[in-house]
Amino acid sequence: MTAPNTAMQQQQPQGQAPARATRPIDNIRNLLEAAKPKLAEVTPKHLTPDRLMRVAIATMSRTPKLLECTPASLLNSVMQAAQLGLEPGSALGECYLVPYKTTCQLIVGYRGLISLARRSGQIASIEAHVVHQKDKFNCRYGIDAKLDHEPDWSADPGPMVAVYAVAKLTDGSVQTEVMTKAQVDAIRKRSKSANDGPWVTDYNEMARKTVVRRIAKYLPLSVEMAEALALEDGDEVQVVDLPALPEGGSRTDAVKARLAARLGTPGPTAEERAAAEDLVAQAAAEAEAAEAAARAGEPEPGSEG
């Protein structure tokens, strides 16, 4: 019994500690670090790649099931959060990284949708509230629509019975939407993460989000809000991989590269591909005209003075 141990000791150089296996969280950290330049391309100014990576790593550390997801799905979800300008899993509750078997899925929360909705610049305020059984609640639709809600502030206001959203636009108009708990639960049942993630840990927040999604159909949307809604409506959402602009490349090259990347995403119909190809040609022509004007010292087409 002593011989094998002696042989092992001889194979291990003296004074050298045995190699430690790399932890899954370290692999993900290295993956995000390698993707940092790409994150920097899509992350808006109010959110830095370093901040996004720290928040994502902290979320994965708190949720071990995320480390069982494929690295590609984890990176894809973080990239989607970067494109939307939302922090996944932070105390802000803007969006969540949720494990679905071996796939990580980004779920935008109630506060995230509110933030995205207001980016259109046409929404003065938007809020959503839960109605409990003991609350005084009166909703009436029609020509003289009315919505009144007086919450019961006792320690036990009763179970949730409904949820509603109110949006005020900058033009002074108001839009309201009300959903019963049964309607919210019907939406939950269709979710792949109905029994995991925020639907379990933050039900009221997800109920608010559900009614905000419903009212968004009647509101002017920001580009990010539209992307967030499309992200959750699609079965498989792929992040568009924008090719880096070659050194010395022109603005025309950049437009062509970005729009060509959109053509490479899976699933477009023949009509969509034809429309996208027309968009490539149009954008390229506009960029070439802008460059020609810049070389001549003239204002770009469409610019004023």
Image (cartoon, rainbow, N blue to C red):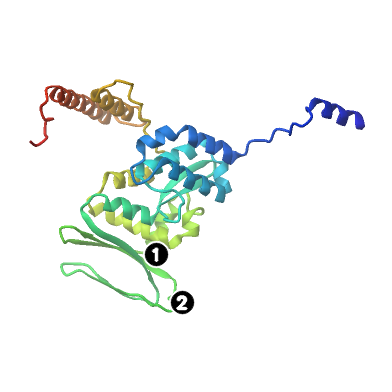
Asked if disc 2 and disc 1 are in contact, CB closer than 8 Å, the reply is: no
Q: Residue at 11% x, 30% y: name it.
A: 299
Q: Position of residue 109 (x, y in %)?
A: 40, 54
Check disc 1: other Cα within 10 Å, few if <14, some if 14-19, many if 20+.
some
Instruction: Quadrant for the N terminus, please.
Output: top right
Q: Position of residue 293 (x, y in %)?
A: 13, 25
**Between marks 2 and 1, how big is the CA–CA gap?**
18 Å
- Of labels 2 and 1, earlier in sequence is 2
Q: Is residue 236 left or right of residue 297?
A: right
Residue pointed to by mark 1: 181
Residue pointed to by mark 2: 156
Q: Residue at 44% x, 54% y: name it.
A: 189
Q: Residue at 68% x, 36% y: name it.
A: 20
Which quadrant of the structure image shows residue 7?
A: top right
Q: Secondary structure at mark 1?
A: helix
Which amino acid, mark 1?
Lys
Q: Residue furthest bottom?
A: 154
Q: Residue at 32% x, 53% y: name it.
A: 115
Q: Position of residue 297 (x, y in %)?
A: 12, 25
Q: Is residue 269 left or right of residue 103?
A: left
Check disc 2: other Cα within 10 Å, few if <14, some if 14-19, many if 20+.
few
Task: Specify whether residue 53 is in view.
Answer: yes
Instruction: Quadrant for the C terminus, please.
Output: top left
The label number, if any, that marks residue 293 in the structure image: none
Which amino acid, mark 2?
Asp
Q: Position of residue 118 (x, y in %)?
A: 27, 53
Q: Secondary structure at mark 2?
A: loop
Give whichever of 190, 128 is nearer the camera.
Answer: 128
Q: Is residue 165 left or right of residue 298?
A: right
